Structure formats: structure tokens, C-alpha cells
Image (tube, rainbow, N blue to C red):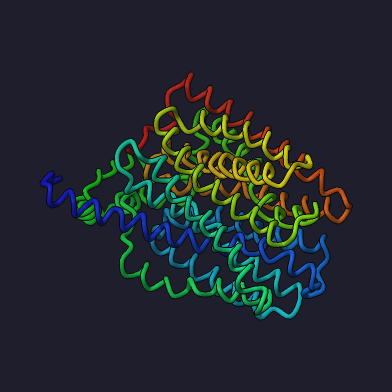
Amino acid sequence: MSSSPALSARGSRLALLVVGLCWLAVLFDGLDMFVYGSVLPHMLEEKALGITSGQAGDLGSYATFGMLVGALAAGTIADRIGRKKLMVSCVALFSLASGLCAIAGSVAVFGLGRTLAGIGLGGLLPTAISMVSDYAPRGRAAITIGLLMTAHHAGGILSAYVALWIVEPLGWRSAFWVCVMPLLFVPVLLRFLPESLGFLVAQGRTEEARTLADRYDVELPAAPADKPAGARWENLANLFRGREWVQTLLYWLASFGGLLLVYGVATWLPTLMRGEGYELGSALTFVVLFNLGGIVGMLVAGRASDRFGAPRISAIWFAVTACGVFLLSVHMPLTVTFVVVFLTGVFLNSAQTMIYATVSIGSAPANRATAVGWTSGMGRFGAVFGPWLGGQLLAADRADWGFTAFAIAGFSSMVFIGIAALRTTATSPRVAPAH
């Protein structure tokens, strides 16, 4: 690989382009994911489509169920057809599905739209993580993934302002029309996003991969050994070889609790805070602070994980998160509540992302999308359960128990990822890192 200054500078700019395109795709992912929680208070107040609190929780779970399906399927599909094609398909799917939500005349049609959107949203995230992992500088994989995930929370912030600036004058449907706009981004991805290096090598397209690696000034991943390219279930089976099944299950259980917490809070935070007596504007301010904290947390956690190890940082972050979420069930002055929400956002969102970083960094390039996709996908069971649980507690007039339940989920994730961290220290890595 050439090491000339001109090529290195050019390669760095092009590598930034890859991360930048994935960042924008994940921004739209975050907008579409968080917009439902942001407009939910309006929908409940207006009795839009005739929904009740219990149905609102069900609708939130429809999207996360779709994300479960999308995440489980994405890894295997991406390892077969390529990360780029799957990313483009996912962006197109959740954009069109948001249009279906915008024109929905019944709860059933709206729920179908959220389910289809969830499939696209669930497929995009692990695919984008795998893509940026391929192009991350040596020793900077965790911070690169953390940087990518700031886009998800930037999308959450954007969703709050969509609710404040657009929904008030134009109604709740306008928010979902805004979420159709990422469809315009599809041609940009098709034109400028390169294919994953790991995928190209795994498919035997070595010369094409080498050309890209030279162009982007990154290391060419090693070819997978003793495995025919494209073996349908081989990548999934690799997660259970020998004693790998123990580590895999620990990651899946930690992801379950983490995503229960993330999506439970993301769906119900504005509504729960409004139920505590805050005005809608203040309740949406919590969404902004929560996601600003997420952005800060991604950068801090990514840097710390590159230095101390992603599973260790994730365990510590979950412990602090559990304390912060529990504090939200205690009535506090508004300023103190703002601080607690911000700090909870710092630790909560990045704790879950560092599970993905742990899996991504410790997986072979040819197997990475499957490993991350299935960790995300199994965690989506928690993402389905979290919004449903919040809705049931709210319908039973026990909203204060919602924060306690979410805190317990955070504690459980701390335990599982903590055990995984100890096993990582005591044993050799599950797979040699690609970078």
C-alpha cells in the first residue's frame, strides 16, 4: 500500500466520506425512530386514530418488532449481497413506510407502517456499524463507531424540534412526511458509498478490495480461512463454535436489557415527564437533553473503550445508567431533573453502543455483520418489550414504576456485560480483531 503523503491525505478524505455517508444514514434512522415518541403526546391529546395509552405502547413495540426482524435478517443478508445494497434498501424502506404512517386512516395501517419502518431501521444500524468498522483507522474502531452513533441521537434531537416547529401548526402527520425525505438520500448512497472491504474479500473479489484499500489508505482485511464464501449459515454457526456460545449469549442478554432500557425510555420519556406535570415544551426539552447526552457519551465512551476495552466501559456505563434512570422516578427540582436526564443520556446510549463495538471489534471481517446483526437482533426482543411495558404501566396509572423497571434492566445488562468483560480478560479474544 502506498504511503505517499498525497495518497494518505486523499485516502483520509475519502475514508471520512464513507463515515460521513453512514453518519447521515444513521441520522435519518434516529429521526424516524425517535419521532414517534416525540409526537406521541400530541397524538394522545388529540386521540389521533382513536389510540389509547395501551395501544400507544403496542404501536411503539410494532416498530421495535420490525427492528428485531430487520436486525436478525440484516447480518446474514449483508454478508451475502453486500453492505452497500442493504443500506440503500433500508433507507428506502423506512422512508416509504413513514409515508404510509402519514396517510394512515386507522391504527392498523399506522401499525403496519411502523412495523415496516422498523425493519428498515433495524437493518440499517448493524450494517452501518460493520461498514465503518472496515474503514476505521487502526486502534480507533470504538471511537469511530461512537462517532457514527452520535448521528442516531442527533436524529433524536431533530425529532423533538420537528414536534415543536412542525407538528404544532401542521398536525402529527406532518412529522411522518418529514421522515419520507431521506428517500432523496438514496441516489447519493448509490453514487458515492463504496462496498465493504470485508465483504469483498469474503466474496473472493480480492483485487477490487485491494484497489479500494489503496484508494482509502486502510488495511486490507485478511481473507477468511477454511470457509467457502457465502456459506448460508456458516457465519451464524461460528458464533457458537467451541465455548463461543457462552460469550455470544452474554452479549445477547446484555443487549436485551440495554435495548429494553433505550427504547422504553426513548418512547415514553416525553409522555412520562408530561405526566409528572411538565409542559409539553419542557417534556420535549428532556428529549433534546437526553440525546445531547447521548452524543457526548458516544465520543467519551468510544475514546475510553479504545483505551480500556469496550466491555469494561459498557459495564460501568450501565451501572451509572441504572442509578440515573431510577432517580427520574424521584420528584426533583426542574434544573436538577435536566441535569439527571442529560447525564442519563450520556451513559445509557453509549453503554449499549459499546456492546456493539465489543462484538464488532472482536469479530472477523467476513463474520462481522452477522455477529453485530444478531446481537442487535436478539436485543430487539428487549426493544419490543420496553415500549409495551411502559404503555401497560401508564395505562395502569403506575408510570412511576416505569423508571424503576427500566433501571432494573440496566442493572441486568451491567451484570451480563461485566461477566463478558471478565471472560475476555481471562481468556484469549474470541476472534482476533480486524484492525
Quadrant placement of the N terminus: top left
Q: Residue 81, percent across and down?
A: 40, 60
Q: Nearer the viewer, residue 233 or 37?
A: 37
Q: Nearer the viewer, residue 153 or 212?
A: 153
At a point 45% along the width and 42% down the height, the residue shown is: 299
Q: Is residue 381 above or below residue 45?
A: above
Q: Is residue 226 above or below residue 174?
A: above
Q: Is residue 299 left or right of residue 256?
A: left
At a point 76% along the width and 72% down the height, the residue shown is: 107
Q: Residue 170, percent across and down?
A: 65, 79
At a point 61% along the width and 72% down the height, the residue shown is: 175
Q: Is residue 129 left or right of residue 394?
A: left
Q: Residue 92, percent across and down?
A: 49, 71
Quadrant placement of the C terminus: top left
At a point 52% along the width and 26% down the height, the residue shown is: 421
Q: Nearer the viewer, residue 111 or 223?
A: 111
Q: Is residue 110 above or below residue 364?
A: below
User: Hey, which quadrant is residue 306 in on the image?
Assistant: top left
Farthest residue toward the top? 426
